Amino acid sequence: MLKQCSLLIYILCFNVFYAQSSLKNTIEVAKDSVKKKAFVKHLGNGYLPTKYFNFDLRYLIKFNQYEGIRTGIGGTTNDTFSKKFRVNGYSVYGFRDDRFKFGVGAGLKIAQKTNTWLNFSYTDDLQETGSTKFLTDGRFFQFFEPRLLNIDLFHKHITKAVSVDHQLLNSVSTKTEFSISRIHPTYNYVFNSDNVSLSKFHVSMAKIAFHWSPFSEFTSSENETKETKSGFPKFTLQYSKSIKNVFKGNFNFSKIDFRTVHKFIVEKDNYTEITLVSGIANGDTPLTHMYHAYPNNITKETVMQRFSVAGLNSFETMYFNEFFSDKFTTLQLKRFFKPFHISKRFNPQLVLISRFAIGDMKQPEKHENITFKSLKKGYTESGLEINKLLFGFGLSFTYRYGAYYLPEFTDNIALKFTFNVTL
């Protein structure tokens, strides 16, 4: 009997020890799995994480027509360093223009519940002329940026900015910014403002932006509000005001920009996406702050010489610097079909695309040494993409037609690569 009891105790102890060991191993495996998922998520957002600092992969290497190869390093502190204070910065070098660019910034959380941050930044860099960015846009990362390869119209700017991020509601995020910029176009350009010709100028700008996702689902924690389910449509509205004679500002003008995105989802990879973008600039507005409608076609003779990489929301047959507007609207429709499951690793996807743009400019004569057209007749293009043919690469074919159809048939065609990778 004593032996049986001893054997039973031994078996129980062994099972307890084995269970503890198994539980410990399971916990370690779970921790490793969570770490791997977090690591992959950081990479998907363009960061290489370390203990206190996340390196920003966006600055490693890029290419454009003005700088040539652009390479550098950048990053930001993470939550392990501090949940209430952050520092970020970058430095890059362009081999063709032989010039360093850099930016530094810092942020201080001033309200936990509304995730309110007070930010400061100093930037000495380039910006594409005619481009507009919404303050509330989240971080967007691509392994390489297709449009950037072909852009040649940049302006230098040295900008000092102070901004406030604020979560007004779970579904509404806001950002307010005041900036002072010294701008010098890299191309031969003169703007006539009040009978004064300016090739360099100062812009003092106040901006406020709202992003509203009324049909998304959110979870709130002590540190942040997270979107757990993305709902559509989404709306973004931004108002900008340039103020003359404040911190040497040369111009009085205002801009209103609007964007909405809607998806009609059948299933995960089978849906229709509609994107509407509109903007209007009033007052004495230099070309640097006008609208270009996101062109992505190089001015070269043959289709194959123009062969490059298609963008996500750009007009593939519209040539760079062909159109500029002080008011414009673009509408893009994309129909994503369910991927063709040919094999385990070969699942190409067909996407049908149609784009439309319309716009105009009141006083084009104010902009000297540069020629461009308006969009008042309406610009149209349609085409298709076959994505994920090999290693994330696919093919895009787009055709330009309507009021701005060009006399030479091949000048209306764009044949390009696509690139889609999901981590």
Image (cartoon, rainbow, N blue to C red):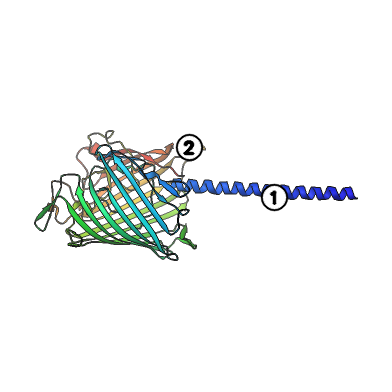
Q: Is residue 93 left or right of residue 57?
A: left
Whether residue 129 is visible? no
Which residue of the protein is positioned furthest toward the right in this rendering? 1
How many marks the image carries: the answer is 2
Of mark 2 and mark 1, the one earlier in the sequence is: 1
How far apart are labels 2 and 1 at the CA level? 44 Å
User: Mark 1 highlights which residue?
Assistant: 20
Q: Is residue 259 left or right of residue 372?
A: right
User: Mark 2 highlights which residue?
Assistant: 346
Disc 2 to disc 1: CB gap under 8 Å: no
Residue nearest the observer in this picture, 320 or 400: 320
Q: Amino acid at mark 1?
A: Gln
Which residue of the protein is positioned furthest toward the left in this rendering? 195
Q: Amino acid at mark 2?
A: Phe
Q: Give how far across and how far down residue 95 sits, in percent.
A: 27, 37
Residue at (50% x, 37% y) in the render: 345
Dot 1: what SS? helix
Q: Give how far across and how far down residue 160 sits, in percent.
A: 27, 56
Residue at (15% x, 44% y) in the render: 188
Residue 145 in which image quadrant: top left
Q: Give how far across and how far down residue 381 sits, in percent.
A: 28, 46
Whether residue 261 is visible? yes
Within-10-Å neighbours for mark 1: few <14, some 14–19, many 20+: few
